[in-house]
Amino acid sequence: MDFPLPFSPPLPRSILLAGLGFLSLVCGPSGSRIAAAEVAPPLIKEASQGQPCAVAARPVDPFEEVWLQVGARSCLKCHKPGGDAEDSKFVLRDPAKDSSPHQDESRQHNQTAFQKMAGVREKEGFLMLVKAAGGLDHGGEDVLKPGSPGFRTLEQFVQQVASGTLPATTPGPAMAIEPQGDFFEGVAMMEDGNLLRRLTLSLAGRLPTRDEESQIGQGGLKALAPVLETVMKEEAFYDRLAEAFNDIFLTRGYGEGAESALSYEHFSTTRHWTQKHDLSSITDEKARQKARYKLADDYREALLREPMELVKHIVRENRPFTELVTADYIMISPYTARGYGLFEELKGRFKNTEDPFEYVPVRLPSLKNRTGRDHQESPTGFYPHAGMMSLFQYLRRYPTTETNRNCLRARMYYQHFLGVDVMELAARVKDAAAVTAKFEVPVMQASECVVCHRTLDPVAGVFQDYYSLEGVFGPRKEGWFKDVFGPGFEGEDLPADQRWRALQWLGEHTARDPRFASTMVEHGFYVLTGRKTLLPPKDPAEPHYRAKLHAQQAQHREVARIAAAFVQSGYNFKAILQGWAVSPFYRADGLAAQDLATNPERAEELGDVGLVRLLTPEQLERKVTAIFGRGWGRLQDPQFALLYGGIDSKEVTERATDPSGAMGAIQRAMANDVACRNVPKDFSRPPAERRLFPKIDPDVAPGSSPEADLRIREAIAHLHHLILGRNDAPDSPEVGRIYDLFAGVISDAQERQGFEPLDIYACRVEGEGRIKDPRYIMRAWRAVVTCLLRERDFLYE
Amino acid sequence: MRRDFLKLCGLAGLGVAAPVAIPGLGFAAEEARSASANPDAFEGPYYVVFNASGGWDTTYLMDPKGTDGINRLYGNGDIQTRGQLKFAPNAAHMEAGAGMSNEDFFAEFGSELLVVNGLDYSVNNHSPCARYMATGHLDSLAYPTFAALVAACRGPQCPLAYLTFGNYSNTGNLVPMSRIPYLPSLQRVANADSVEGQQRSPYHDDFVLDRIERTLKAQTDARLSRQVLPRVERAESMLYAAQINSKALQRVTPYIPAEIPKARLAQQVEIALASFKAGVCVSANLTIGQFDSHANNDKDQMKLIPEFLAGIAHLMRRAEALKIRDRLVVVIQSEMGRTPQYNKGNGKDHWSIGSVMFMGKGIQGNRVIGATDEKQFCVPVDPATLATNAEKGVRLRPEHIHGALRELAGITDHRLSAQFPYTVPATERLQGLWG
């Protein structure tokens, strides 16, 4: 459990946005700049392909510096409305909750407050410095150690204010474009056609159609929006969405069997319906048993899928994504409806009552306890759904205990919906054990603990009626704990008349919170890139601090830009994906002209730029299927997928981002096997039906004539395009090296006396014998495809 | 500007083993390869970090109290000793077959054990504590675990340089982490160039494979000779190293035991040992969880501590059988301790003071450094003498331990270590911790 907690709450990423330099995305014809307000809605604007795009990153001014290092990290925890120091003379505004354009108002307020307070001098010294070091009965005690980087920054700021040497800053207008420091200067963007391929593979697991290629070819990025609209209607897109959001919420990982989502207290007679389901029509006992196993497996899978079906439904129906926390329904299939005991009343709503995975939105009736007592109170008669938060699977995935007191749920709530990771960076405490022992109720009395528990406990209290140890509905018998801060949200108490619908109340507050939008944009970034957005560097003394700060600021300005468009779209999640799709952060593909080896600061700035994502096991299978027409299959085995960096949503919850030796071995095995299965098979088809070799036959030998060599090179260029997504010319060095491989293999073979004239048995076409390969050409083509399948352009996005 | 790829791999912290003969393909990270019959095999020391995930009760192991209601299962007079080491008795409280008692563990390994008590984690939440204990740095999410760092410094060419089975495992982007969840998994990837892993059924003739490897190297070199984004450069290097190094996995097969042990920690140990013995692994991060005994502390700890110790004993005994015991360095840790008092549920909550134990190559055993007082608070230590000094000593924290671990591993001045410095003043560096 997390009690008591002498830690400091880390910052939501968006807090750090405000008070900093302001948005100035530049994305247009080379050298031009377009202010964000012009770019935002619609999200997709023209940008020249293959040309550098630029986002201006302003130099950090003194207030930004002190805000980042001190204000946001230390002062804001207590010196804010609802905070421990709300009655002091130094009250700041939380930029993350500022809905003014680009958080101008909070920045202005905080800058003024800082400057005013910095000028106050007592006999002990400058008030701000003395208090920060724990003097003058500072309630937060010593938040900064004299001599620490943060203290030095504060000291410098105070001196500049006192001496009147604080440089003039430019707090507004927010859209100011800096003449220097263009973040993407010298970075080449991906060609539009390749961007299209990247997006269709990523979002729909397929290659682009010729029609789509044509649209992009003619219309450039402008044409991307309608193409994406179409892609985002495909079922494969929704499967991808479910996969990515499960990475975030991990709901498939709840314990003790899928049926455990339905509690014994409320679904005791229905949750195991598969055990008694009438299968008497199957007369053979073994077949009947097998059918029952399948029934149970499908039912469990249907239950596991329910949370992600909610995500899919919201996006598919273009509903506001705020329904993630406010939806007053859940998604139910014919199979799970039986588990809830609602099948009879719902069966008319399904197209096929025997389809385990056809889902419809449903409001559950309020829960009735099997004992006849302790029924769930509900004036409406319905279960008070609050999107993801009230789903049984979500509650089971993040259960509570008597000592945890819903703190885990509160922590996950902040992480999932407001982008705050309370465990991200814990402040060091001089003697945490002593603090724990000193106070009777440390979480309410010790400043080290209060600073976070004042935020965490109220949300934990909002979940108080979901206290059954099974993780679902059931209030604590003794009533909610008195030695914690009471239920509520960020300074607002939960009204008594809202108790029965507390999670709905929380959901409504969450949807209004500006942090929700930016957090969803960050989730969108994860969906597309497989990684989280950058955190600001903490220690100014660390190497490349300024470069890291610039990189983080530039990225988070982009988050703010897309968040604004997301809000303007009515919280349509597709707007987020469209926003990232044309963002230079997603399109950056290379360096136009700069030598990073001699500029380590710039190298650090660009350290996270570019997609370069190792495909997950699921993505790799889909890519093989998209290119070859059938998957490899082995990565569908959960154990093999784990070995290839996958997750199980329980113990292993983060995907591997770099290939280990074991993963390298799997790549080799995949390349060997996929080439073996597909090269001879492709050649066995009529040329018009071939994917890999539509314009060449396996009797064309290298060196036999210039025409033959050209055909071979063209065939390789086709493979480069198909497998690697590269548009290499037949006479390019890249194609040349693969030609050398092809020709070299044949030459080597022919130098060996009596090589085997048949290809290996494993690579035969199904139903046929070993393939005759007297000149070793078939095997040379296998070598070529094997080689290409091991390249980064295939194995990475 | 054309850059040599292998040099680049070295700069990136990557090494490349070269199990196939490729003309022109050199060797990187040569410092990691000792002169041996098999120049690609890493021959140690091998580093094993055991994690009691969730927070162990040190007063039921190496820092016994038995007073003031701290322990219900024994009194102060029941505390056992072995040489200089004190430990809590638990043989009488274990369930049959639960694992290894403290009595047996200290009897067998006490002469090798270095115990550090009174370690101050500074905070008492799982995530930051686990991060702090694993990396020696509380305030950064970027630092690698010690196991990852030493793997990157000592054996970057190893295909499974850094094995991890859970707990905090950050690599600092220095080395890929390898997850091998089950022993049979190792067999499945050992012969990737053969049909169904059968060595006698290769997909390609050897000369074809050589051609493929050569072509991939040429393609990689060509791409990296151009200006590319840092992420691209890193990915190219990582991918190349992963594929070429993976061939060395063939060496693991002979060391995969015929029978898979049932105990969860022993399974992890077998995977690590097979990888060590094959010379394809530098470090392993082993873990079992559920130590977070907020309810029924004594029952849980009596179940888990014996299981944990049995896993450690399994490592040492099997390493002896494999003749690599003298090349092991073992770290035995948890992310926090447990409160001196019981809560209302007979459990114990988080405590920011704990202990860590070590044994193996270069470590003098039968010693205890640091202490907690009778109320389980940290007693500071004089870094120069390692004696407790409540008034002038320093509070031992993970960065002190990690600094010393880097010294033990000889990587303090390694360029990769320099990327992740500790700000421990020279006067606070522990002198002679390892004996």
Image: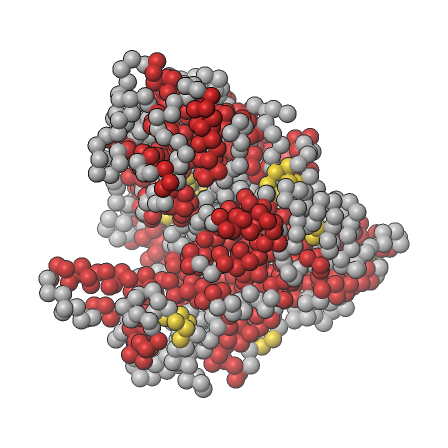
Residue A452: image quadrant is: bottom right
Nearest the eye: A364 or A693: A693
Nearest the eye: A272 or A478: A272
Q: Residue furthest left?
A: A284
Q: Which residue lies furthest to the right in this view?
A: A164
User: Is residue A512 shown above or below B194?
Assistant: below
- Identified at 34% across, 42% down, the residue is A632
Q: In the image, residue A564 lies at what x, y percent?
A: 65, 63
Whether residue A495 is visible here, answered yes or no, is yes
Whether residue B390 is visible here, answered yes or no, is no
Q: In the image, residue A293 lies at what x, y percent?
A: 21, 60
Nearest the eye: A413 or B233: B233
Viewed as shown, does residue A372 lie left or right of A397? left
Residue B393: image quadrant is: top right
Q: In the image, residue B382 lies at what x, y percent?
A: 58, 39
Quadrant housing the N terminus of chain B: top right
- Identified at 53% across, 72% down, the residue is A507
- Identified at 47% across, 70% down, the residue is A387
Nearest the eye: B297 or A493: A493
Q: Which residue lies furthest to the bottom in this view?
A: A379
User: Is residue B19 shown above or below A175?
Assistant: above
User: Is residue B225 shown above or below A213?
Assistant: above
Q: In the image, residue A415 lies at what x, y percent?
A: 53, 60
Q: How many labels does the image show?
A: 0
Viewed as shown, does residue A368 lie left or right of A15? left
- Identified at 25% across, 45% down, the residue is B262
Viewed as shown, does residue A317 lie left or right of A370? right
> How are the colours assigned in the image?
secondary structure
